Amino acid sequence: MKKLTKKDKLNLLRWFRVLVQIVFFVFLPAVFSQSFAAIKSIAETVGNGEVIKNNSFIVSFIVVSIITILCGRIFCGWACSFGAFGDWVFQVSQFIQKKLKIKFPKISDKAISYLKLLKYIVLITIIVLCFCGKASLVAENSPWTVFSLVRVGQYKFAVYATSTILMCIVIVGMAIKERFFCQFLCPLGAVFAILPVLPFISLKRNKDNCIPKCNACKNNCPVKIKLQDNSLTDGECISCMRCRMICPKGNIKN
Ligand code: SF4
Ligand code: SF4
């Protein structure tokens, strides 16, 4: 049997990931919104001075958090419906840019490193609003509310005009920068970025074996992880495995 080339393996991984994302998008689309609802519900309950009770939102959040602690952000890279939606918007945008022979503006690495901090501000703002009893404000003005309602066919523009405008801005961002929402705005992403701390889930790179000035791993990373060090423990990594597959020398391993 013909041995698979690097390119074949990369294509196989790409299609396998798309398949997994479609399965989760179709059959388990609510895990993202349920986990997000758990953060709001905990902040709201504490703000009301009540005792936190177990519910399906909290169970969903705990399960995804445990998976993230033990295995890294595979939920983000492979299972989140909003993350998958962002990937597809970016791929369509790449296709259109190629066909029209145009290029959207690039965001510099320095700007990306600052923009990544925005999601913590979003998370803190949401927690404070919910704590102060303004959870409805969050729901009425969230782009992910539009996303969830469109999916279940209950969307009404008149009620969700602001969140629709925000969703349109997010889609433009997703078209310009891969994983735009995940890196810069997702409140769950902010929580998940601080969870993967266990050493055995970090990617390791044999830097000495690298082709000089190659940088294929960094250039192909959807979230532009800095690969200066051998050990790649980084909460921003969404475990897409692209760097492992793309390295011409097979230098990156768990
Ligand atoms: S960062 Fe947020 S939107 Fe992106 S994949 Fe993770 S949970 Fe989903
Ligand atoms: S390319 Fe590598 S470092 Fe970047 S997100 Fe994917 S697995 Fe993580």
Image (tube, rainbow, N blue to C red):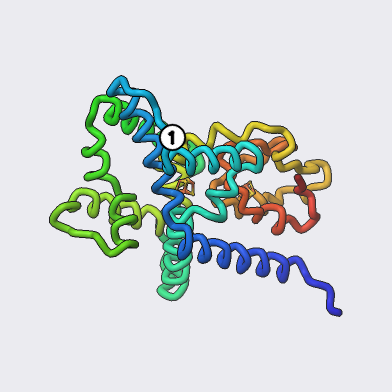
Residue 167 x %, y %: 29, 53
User: Label 1 sits on what residue type?
Assistant: Asn
Report the number of discs.
Answer: 1
- Residue labelled 1 has its Cβ within 8 Å of some atom of ligand 1: no
Residue 42 visible? The answer is yes
* Residue 115 shows up from this direction: no
Give neighbour class at mark 1: few <14, some 14-19, many 20+ (Cα, 10 Å): few
Q: Position of residue 21 (x, y in %)?
A: 53, 61
**Residue 236, image quadrant:** top right
Please report the residue visible at 26 percent of the width from the left and 35 percent of the height from the top: 135
Residue found at the very far top of the displayed protein: 49
Q: Nearer the viewer, residue 23 or 63?
A: 63
Residue found at x 51% / y 65%:
22
Q: Position of residue 217 (x, y in %)?
A: 67, 51
176 with respect to 224 (left or right): left
Q: Secondary structure at mark 1?
A: loop
Residue at the (47%, 62%) spot, across then down: 25
- The quadrant of the image that shows the C terminus is top right
Q: From the image, which quarter does the N terminus lie in? A: bottom right
Q: Residue at x 77, y 47 (%)?
A: 253
Residue 43 is drawn in which quadrant? top left
Residue named by callout 1: 54
- Residue furthest to the right in view is 1
Residue 188 in the image: state x and y as whole percent: 45, 40
Q: Is residue 166 above or below residue 153?
A: above
Q: In the image as oriented, which residue stretches furthest toward the bottom?
A: 1
